[in-house]
Image (tube, rainbow, N blue to C red):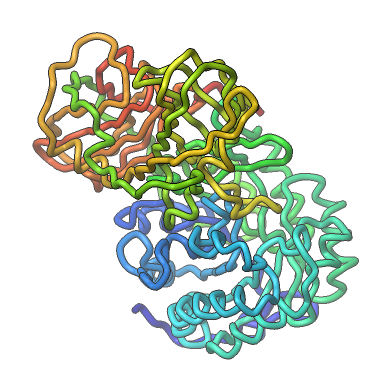
Amino acid sequence: MSASTPSRFVVGEQDFLLDGRPHRIISGAMHYPRVHPDLWRDRIRKARLMGLNAIETYVAWNAHEPVKGEWRADGDVDLGRFLDIIAEEGMHAIVRPGPYVCAEWHNGGLPAWLTADANVRLRSSDPSYLGEVTSFLEKVNAIIAPRQIDRGGSVILVQIENEYGAYGADTEYLDALVRCTREAGITVPLTQVDQPIPHMLEAGAHPALHKTGSFGSRIDERLRILREHQPTGPLMCMEFWCGWFDHWGEKHHTTNFADSAADLDRLLSAGASVNIYMVHGGTNFGLTAGANDSGRYLPLVTSYDYDSPITESGDVTAKFRAFRDVIAKHAPVPDEPLPDPVEAPAFSVGFEAVADPLSLTATHRGEFERPPTMDELGPDVVLVEYTTDAAGSGVLEAEVRDYAWVERDGAPVGRLQRTIGDASLALPDGDQLQLLVEETGRVNYDQKIGEPKGLIGAPRLGGRALPGPWSVRTIDVAALGAAVSDAAALPAGGPIAGPVGLRATFDLDESADLFLGTVGWGKGYAWVNGFFLGRYWRRGPQRTLYVPGPVTRSGRNEVVIVELESVTDPTARFLPRPDLGHEVE
């Protein structure tokens, strides 16, 4: 771990104080699991070139402990190394361990094994919940504590919970989190964040926590409301929203960089500290993308570019330059050249097919009188095949979370889709019914965090509940890439019906960032050299998947997809630039 001379960082009457002198935080958000670890230093260094003096990150509990008792803090979740690199680059760090983080991250960061327990009252002083939370925070704080600024490290602030005033008002819960954090050796100031809406700031208040706000416009109004609820100490926008996220089926969101820069200028001119959300968004690799549901379920895309100043692939943008110019009016900015955007290699290669890839990683889970939810089948199950005898014809009614392919006697008959309220389907006469159900992202905000996934209750045929028994198989999605890579091939030509595995090899002169085009594909998952890039979906807006340079190599490389619907063009096309969809401000 890199260490420097210890310093003292405190909350003063009007300012943050660093060794007794007023200090303004100009920070940017960057989530280490959303960035390949070999690229952490590059992204942090570019943030410093924009004029930032700090990096903020959430800690996603389910990234560190996806299975209860199997804790990880290495590789892509090596929080200690991430904080050390921040220190080595001469910057401070802000850590927000939650335990709830939102962040458009799967389940808001809470592990599915925790939220599957219906008796646990989430984000509350419920002893069963606090017992698990305490264990998590002890592990995280053991990483943070030796890296605090007063021990020669980078960490200057630690946040308790996240936007709690929008969810609850359990002071005993906040008491427990503060006590646990302090007992673990965290000595730097503790903060909280809420939107500057009076009832949220009041519900989430705690005397041990310095209030900060989350907003991206109406700067003067938001700072005024925040000051009314935080009479002394520095004003800080902990989330200055300079972009936005995308859902499948919507347009790609961007913000006008000149308007965002003007709002940043207003914020800094008011003397406030800021954390730009996001300075670099990164990618929801694998199955980590969340979902929102404010009356309609909307899953998030794989890219978390967020229209950030530093793009998903690390390019600096017009927004970066505009923000840098604004920051230079208020603080020192490094006088160093900025890197130019680099186009990725462009080429295409034909796929070969592997039939029935799902059987390669499927596990028969037994016979059930009623269809079990995914949560009852184990942590982070995302693809389940339910089969039963159901003679006759009629209208099938089923609540699926979130997407289902329906087969009758082995023949496809249609789909059920939660996002569009599709909950019924006319079935032809037959004997056997099969539903392949996919969880397309767990809700990360509000009251539906931790809701059960899969088939919810018994489907009905002709108005009568199907009695079962139900034969159930779970498919290990994360293992599909390696399984398809090793399986025997079939010839591929023309349109291909899924589920099917497709793979192709290609050569590179050297390791390089790539953009894998998905036009001509349906819905599924993609890997390069065994690295799980994430989901693709013809619904858009995203039309390329970012391939981090460190997962590629000089010489032979392999791309694998598992297609669940159909492919009209069995070709892997690598494009020079990303295509995240038609932009809308």
Q: Quadrant of the N terminus?
A: bottom left
Q: Quadrant of residue 516?
A: top left
Residue name at image x 64 percent, y 48 percent? 326
Would residue 12 appear left or right of 562 to someone viewing this image?
right
Q: Quadrant of residue 399?
A: top right
Residue name at image x 49 percent, y 83 percent? 145
Q: Nearer the viewer, residue 136 or 507?
A: 136
Rendered location of residue 559, percent (x, y): 22, 33
Rendered location of residue 136, percent (x, y): 50, 75
Rendered location of residue 195, percent (x, y): 77, 56
Q: Is residue 303 at least partly visible in the picture?
A: no
Furthest toward the top, the residue is 494
Q: Is residue 244 at least partly visible in the picture?
A: yes
Would residue 330 appear left or right of 234 to someone viewing this image?
left
Q: Nearer the viewer, residue 121 or 166?
A: 121
Q: Nearer the viewer, residue 456 or 241?
A: 456
Q: Quadrant of the C terminus?
A: top right
Q: How many marks?
A: 0
